[in-house]
Structure formats: C-alpha cells, structure tokens
Amino acid sequence: MTHPSVAQAQATSPTTTGVMVVLTVKAGVTREQVMAVMPDEIRQTVQSYLNGKVREWYSRGDGRGAVFLLNARDVAEAHAIMEGLPLAKQNLIDHEYIAVGPLLPLRLLLTNS
C-alpha cells in the first residue's frame, strides 16, 4: 500500500522547463557534407543562444552529433527551433526530443509524513 503523500507526489504531472534535443548525423551523410554547413549552423546556434532559446549545448562523446538543452515550453516549440537551423534544413541530422523538468521525487521532501 502506498502512503497517500507518496501517491499524491507521484500523481503530480511533470512541469516542462526545457527540452533536451539529441542530434545525430544521418547514416550516409559525410563529414564533408556536415562541415560545409557548419559555419552557418554555428552562427545561427549562437544567435539562438543570445536570443535565449538555447540554454546549453554539448558535443556528443561519440562524435556523431550534439546535445542541446533548449528553453522551450514543449517539444513542439523545440522542434520549431531546431528545424530552423541549417543542418536540419538540409536534412543532414536526426533529432530526438525529450521534455525535461524538475525531478519529481524531490516533491516528497515537501510533503508531510
């Protein structure tokens, strides 16, 4: 039997405070194809950062892309941001979108036992 405060904390729907986007170079796309687009991709990504859309960005350890953390209310907004960038416009990368928010179990710290 679950304690009522635990069940209540688990039932709370998560709040999306950002969207993580995993970018992967598509199979068959060459490094040369990607590098030809990178100057524009970098400029537009920096502009998105300066506009408050990109919160953080990282290179993937496997060298096949990047990971962005976007300031977005939902996946649809994140999708619109990413589809505006040159690599996406040229269909060179795939995206995986993951909505993120505060860690739900932390709510247990605020419930009365």
Image: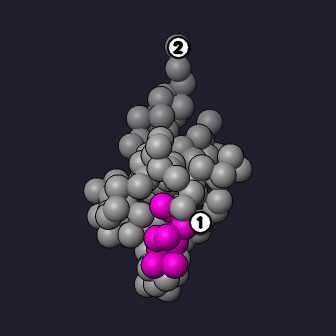
**Which of the 4 quarters of the picture holds residue 19?**
bottom left
Query: Residue pushed farthest top?
Result: 1
Which residue type carries mark 2?
Met
Cα separation between marks 2 and 1: 43 Å
- Say which label, 2 or 1, has the lower sequence index: 2
Residue 96 place in picture, x, y as percent: 44, 46
Residue 54 in the magenta stretch? The answer is no
Tell me: residue 51, above or below residue 59: below
Is the C terminus in the top left, top right, bottom left or bottom right quadrant? top right
Q: Which mark is residue 71?
A: none
Per the image, the residue denoted by label 2 is: 1
Residue 60 place in picture, x, y as percent: 65, 53
Q: Report the residue at 71% width, 50% height from top.
A: 61
Query: Residue pushed farthest right?
Result: 61
Secondary structure mainly formed by the magenta segment = helix
Q: Report the residue at 54% width, 44% height from top.
A: 104
Density class for disc 1 (Cα within 10 Å; few <14, some 14-19, many ≥20) is some
Q: Report the residue at 49% width, 70% height from top.
A: 36
Which residue type carries mark 1?
Trp
Tell me: residue 2, above or below residue 28: above
Residue 16 place in picture, x, y as percent: 42, 55
Tell me: residue 18, above or below residue 2: below
Q: Nearer the viewer, residue 83 or 113?
A: 83
Are the residues flagged by discs 2 and 1 in contact, CB closer than 8 Å?
no
Residue 2 place in picture, x, y as percent: 53, 20
Residue 109 seen anywhere in this rendered image of the structure: yes
Secondary structure type for disc 2: loop
Q: Report the residue at 64% width, 62% height from top.
A: 58
Secondary structure type for disc 1: strand
Q: Which residues are magenta?
A: 33-41
Q: Which mark is residue 57?
A: 1
